[in-house]
Image (cartoon, rainbow, N blue to C red):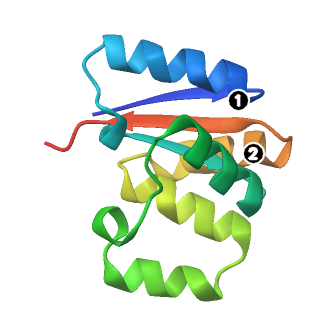
Amino acid sequence: MENVKIVENGVEARREIEQFMTQGYTKDEIYLLAHDKKRSEDLTDALDVDDIGVAEQGVFDAISNVFRSRGDELRSKMESLGVSQGEAEQYEEELDRGRVVLIATKSA
């Protein structure tokens, strides 16, 4: 089960992260994505949430992402968290517009 929010900036992201936590998610279950890799890293660090890594993606996808475009990499990461391919494409368009995507997911 995943819960996705689209926000404009770090302030909105912090508010949504707090909302996710009141719904029972831990910071280890909340992921942040931005189209710009540096922005994604900075926000992930500042807001103390997880990056989508090998544990979520699997070794093959994590290695494959090294060779993918940023858009393909982001869609792959979202799909690894249970987001459908169609939804991942829609969210990636939001990322293209400079927005930030937050995904809270409970591993079954």
Residue 95 disc label = 2
Residue 14, position in %: x, y? 58, 23
Of circles 1 and 2, which is in front? 1
Circle 1/circle 2 CB separation < 8 Å: no
Residue ID at (43%, 49%): 50
Q: Is residue 53 left or right of residue 23?
A: right
- Quarter of the picture containing the C terminus is top left
- Element type at mark 2: helix
Residue in the foreground of this view, choosing between 33 and 14 = 14
Extreme-left residue of the structure: 108
91 relative to 78, above or below: above
Residue 10 disc label = 1
Q: Quadrant of residue 54?
A: bottom left
Q: CA distance from mark 1 to mark 2?
A: 14 Å
Residue 56, position in %: x, y? 32, 61
Residue ID at (82%, 49%): 96
Q: Quadrant of residue 25?
A: top left
14 relative to 102, above or below: above
- Of label 1 and label 2, which has the lower sequence position? 1
Residue 10, position in %: x, y? 70, 29
Residue 49, position in %: x, y? 46, 42
